[in-house]
């Protein structure tokens, strides 16, 4: 039930801190250990390459988890679109391990790949919100998101839930492999900090609504830019904006702007930049200057430590491997408010279904 909320999407955005805390409860075992089937952890740890296969927002969650899995487990990660993988399968490594990300567990494009990798005998894990769903039944392993039903077509809490579950799993695998970075990563403590950071952004709704009114109420197009993890969140931020507000939005790697995209910048084009990393932050700042000098109107979403007084949205500090969980929240609220402003049905965008059960 959406209760006093005008739309499910807003309720589901608001639930994200609760989902983070619930995941801590569900996956934290005795003595602070991760409570995940040891057979799953061992199989993952013994693989030489992880293949994440998913569509839409779940695919973006895969990208956002890539670095953290690689850093904590020392296993390379590839992220693939199900609909592409199905017809153009990459050469697989000697010991591949597949992760299927799917809120609904019913996405036909992903299922098609799972059927194939099952036939090839490769181990598979489905990370889903729906116990007993098709992808869950057909994969060898399942981890649940415990996010509660997600009703709005635009996925929000499933994205953050998926990244959080992958961080917990990566911690367990890294510890199993005795990786120093994993031993030092106190995942449950860090996810609690993420939950509080999300709370504070959600409490700042009015500010984000004002920014949506200023930047996105009438524009025809908009761009998100960032580098590495901030680029991956940019892709998700753009998908959210386009699917419900119908603003033509794209997420770009900030460094690629000058290789083509900058040609699209006109007087007043909104460009939202995400900056959570020190190493890439100054380069993205340079790109902000470049687009501003071509007339772009820029909105900066930046982590506390790197913030300048003119930046519009400041993110509370969290562990760098988990930055996406926090930076995505204002972008969800921007998309939501832009859609309200433009007078569309937030929960039921045109031409889209909640779960896509045809290929
Ligand atoms: O249920 P799934 O996670 O497999 O769904 C995948 C996509 O269809 C889904 O994420 C879609 O892109 C959403 N509408 C995005 O908000």
Image (cartoon, helix red, strand yellow):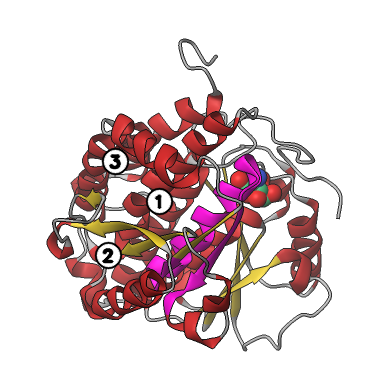
* Residue occupying image coordinates x 27% and y 40%: 195
Q: Main secondary structure of the magenta part?
A: helix
Q: Position of residue 202 (x, y in %)?
A: 31, 34
Nearer to the camera, 302 or 233: 302
Point out the image quarter for the N terminus.
top right
Task: Identify the residue position indicated by label 1 in the image.
Answer: 328
List x then y, in percent, for residue 104: 66, 41
Q: CA distance from mark 1 to mark 3?
A: 10 Å
Query: Is 231 colored magenta in this rendering?
Result: yes
Q: Earlier in the sequence, mark 3 or mark 2?
A: 3
Question: Contact (CB < 8 A) between labels 2 and 1?
Answer: no
Segment tinted magenta in the rendering = 225-254
Residue on which disc 3 sits: 198
Q: CA distance from mark 2 to mark 1?
A: 11 Å
Name the spot of residue 260 as percent of width and height, x first.
57, 83
Residue 151 as seen in the image, left or right of residue 84: left
* Residue located beneath label 2 in the image: 276
Residue 14 lies in what quarter of the image?
top left
Q: Which mark is residue 37?
A: none
Q: Is residue 126 visible?
A: no
What residue is at 44 percent from the left and 42 percent from the top?
334
């Amino acid at each position: 039930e959406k209760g006093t909320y005008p739309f499910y999407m807003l309720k589901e955005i608001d639930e994200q801190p609760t989902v983070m805390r619930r995941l801590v409860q569900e996956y934290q075992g005795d003595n602070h250990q991760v409570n995940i089937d040891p057979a799953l952890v061992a199989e993952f740890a013994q693989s030489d390459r992880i293949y994440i296969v998913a569509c839409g927002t779940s695919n973006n969650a895969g990208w956002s988890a890539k670095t953290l899995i690689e850093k904590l487990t020392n296993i390379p990660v590839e992220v693939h679109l199900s609909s592409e993988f199905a017809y153009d399968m990459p050469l697989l490594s000697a010991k591949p391990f597949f992760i299927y990300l799917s809120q609904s567990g019913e996405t036909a494009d992903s299922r098609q790949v799972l059927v194939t990798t099952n036939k090839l005998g490769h181990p598979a894990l489905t990370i889903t919100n729906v116990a007993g769903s098709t992808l869950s039944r057909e994969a060898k392993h399942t981890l649940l998101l415990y996010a509660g039903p997600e009703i709005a077509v635009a996925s929000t809490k499933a994205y953050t839930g998926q990244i959080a579950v992958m961080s917990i799993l990566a911690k367990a695998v890294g510890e199993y492999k005795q990786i120093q970075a994993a031993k030092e990563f106190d995942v449950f403590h860090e996810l609690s900090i993420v939950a509080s950071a999300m709370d504070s952004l959600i409490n700042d709704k009015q500010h984000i609504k004002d920014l949506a009114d200023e930047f996105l109420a009438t524009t025809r197009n908009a761009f998100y830019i960032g580098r590495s993890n901030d680029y991956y969140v940019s892709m998700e931020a753009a998908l959210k904006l386009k699917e419900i507000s119908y603003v033509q939005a794209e997420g770009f790697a900030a460094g690629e702007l000058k290789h083509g995209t900058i040609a699209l910048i006109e007087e007043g084009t909104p460009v939202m930049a995400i900056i959570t990393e020190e190493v890439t932050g100054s380069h993205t700042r340079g790109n902000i200057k470049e687009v501003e000098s071509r007339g772009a109107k820029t909105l900066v979403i930046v982590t506390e430590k790197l913030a300048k007084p003119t930046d519009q949205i400041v993110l509370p500090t969290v562990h760098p491997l988990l930055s996406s969980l926090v930076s995505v929240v204002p972008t969800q609220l921007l998309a939501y408010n832009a859609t309200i402003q433009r007078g569309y049905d937030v929960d039921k965008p045109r031409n889209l279904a909640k779960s896509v059960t045809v290929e």
